Image (tube, grey):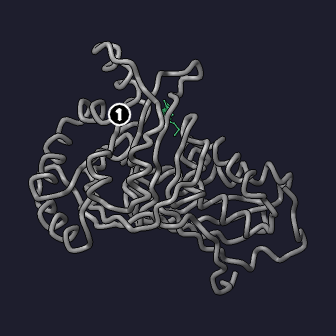
């Protein structure tokens, strides 16, 4: 990585990046590894629900964060925030301690919802700061930095559809450009990802199940066909039983989605957000309407996927 134009007046720039949420169309979870992570095969699918990240340059080398929107009042804005950590990591890699930025994030992705909102913010900070600071970061290097921040961050940088292996960070882009229509049902609270994985370990051990992280080839083929009726029966989330066990209200949400006619419903990632596949836009409207008054559902949104990953754009220059 190199600083392309270190003398550029970065404080006069405002960079905007929009980063999509993800859902996992398949999440095939293997055994716990010695490093505490689980080997996976997962089909990531970026959907049309975005967090916005804006980065403005600072001359004093500080990196600050302000957040607004969905759940933002519950998040720290200090160096424990994944977006701030992303900016700090990028700056450290660049070896330019004088680089500073004010980050502003407008959140829409449900907090701790299993849709990689925190990873989206980290990915947005990486992309925005790389552009703001004039850093020439090869895509592979950016993905490797993302993987240091979290298992889902590389996909948040990529978007579209992708097979994730390893702990989710080893990506292979997948075909499947035909839009799928989804209804997203957010829960009133969140779930901790490590807690869901722990419960997964306990449940598989208790039931004597052998975790299987094999690649879901049938689903990948169905995704390429673009036919939601082919995709629907192949959606799979091995964490779902653990998420429902920790958050029993999810069983009623999944039932409610099917009762109002969704083709299929699944917990998104480690939950508790549930996503429902619909036949087309009209059908999604009907399912969303039916789910909006369901017990245990805080908010309902219609989204489509796949959508592209983040891309930086310069906003009109702010007076600073
Ligand atoms: O990588 P990330 O920080 O998102 O992971 C959060 C936690 O989720 C990990 O500390 C681990 O407990 C769990 N995890 C896992 N296997 C994965 C990904 C995450 O056990 N493949």
Residue 92 in picture, x, y percent from top left: 79, 49
Residue 155 in picture, x, y percent from top left: 56, 52
State the residue at coordinates (45%, 66%): 50
Instruction: Report whether 53 appears left or right of 180.
Output: right
Q: Quadrant of the N terminus?
A: bottom right
Query: Residue 300's quadrant in the figure?
Result: bottom left
Count of number-bearing discs: 1
Q: Quadrant of the C terminus?
A: bottom right
State the residue at coordinates (80%, 63%): 135
Q: What kind of element bears circle 1?
A: loop
Instruction: Report whether 127 appears left or right of 73.
Output: right
Q: Name the residue under label 1.
A: 238
Query: Residue 249's quadrant in the figure?
Result: top left
Question: Of residues 252 and 125, which is closer to you in this image?
Answer: 252
Question: Of residues 173 and 124, which is closer to you in this image?
Answer: 173
Residue 229 in picture, x, y percent from top left: 26, 57
Q: In this view, does 100 lie above or below 95?
A: below
State the residue at coordinates (24%, 35%): 244
Instruction: Report whether 61 appears left or right of 210.
Output: right
Question: Of residues 8 and 289, which is closer to you in this image?
Answer: 289
Instruction: Report whether 46 appears left or right of 138.
Output: left
């Amino acid at each position: 990585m190199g600083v392309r134009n270190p003398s550029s007046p970065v404080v006069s720039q405002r960079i905007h990046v929009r980063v999509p949420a993800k859902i996992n169309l398949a999440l095939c979870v293997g055994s716990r590894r010695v490093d505490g992570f689980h080997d996976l095969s997962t089909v990531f699918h970026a959907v049309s629900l975005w967090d916005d990240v804006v980065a403005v340059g600072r001359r004093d080398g500080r990196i600050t964060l302000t957040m607004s929107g969905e759940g933002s009042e519950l998040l720290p804005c200090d160096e424990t925030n994944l977006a701030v950590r992303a900016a700090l990591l990028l700056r450290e890699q660049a070896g330019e301690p004088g680089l500073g930025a004010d980050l502003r994030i407008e959140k829409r992705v449900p907090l701790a919802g299993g849709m990689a909102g925190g990873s989206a913010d980290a990915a947005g900070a990486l992309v925005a700061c790389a552009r703001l600071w004039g850093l020439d970061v090869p895509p592979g290097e950016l993905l490797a930095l993302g993987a240091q921040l979290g298992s889902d961050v590389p996909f948040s940088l990529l978007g579209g559809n992708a097979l994730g292996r390893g702990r989710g960070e080893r990506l292979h882009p997948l075909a499947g450009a035909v839009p799928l229509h989804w209804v997203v049902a957010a829960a009133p609270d969140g779930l901790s990802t490590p807690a869901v994985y722990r419960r997964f370990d306990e449940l598989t051990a208790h039931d004597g199940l052998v975790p299987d992280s094999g690649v879901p080839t049938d689903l990948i083929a169905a995704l390429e066909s673009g036919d939601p009726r082919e995709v629907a029966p192949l959606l799979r989330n091995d964490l779902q039983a653990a998420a429902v066990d920790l958050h029993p209200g999810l069983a009623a949400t999944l039932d409610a989605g099917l009762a109002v006619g969704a083709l299929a419903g699944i917990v998104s990632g480690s939950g508790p957000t549930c996503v429902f596949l619909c036949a087309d836009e009209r059908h999604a409207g009907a399912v969303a309407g039916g789910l909006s008054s369901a017990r245990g559902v805080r908010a309902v949104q219609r989204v489509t996927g796949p959508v592209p990953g983040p891309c930086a754009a310069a906003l009109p220059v702010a007076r600073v």
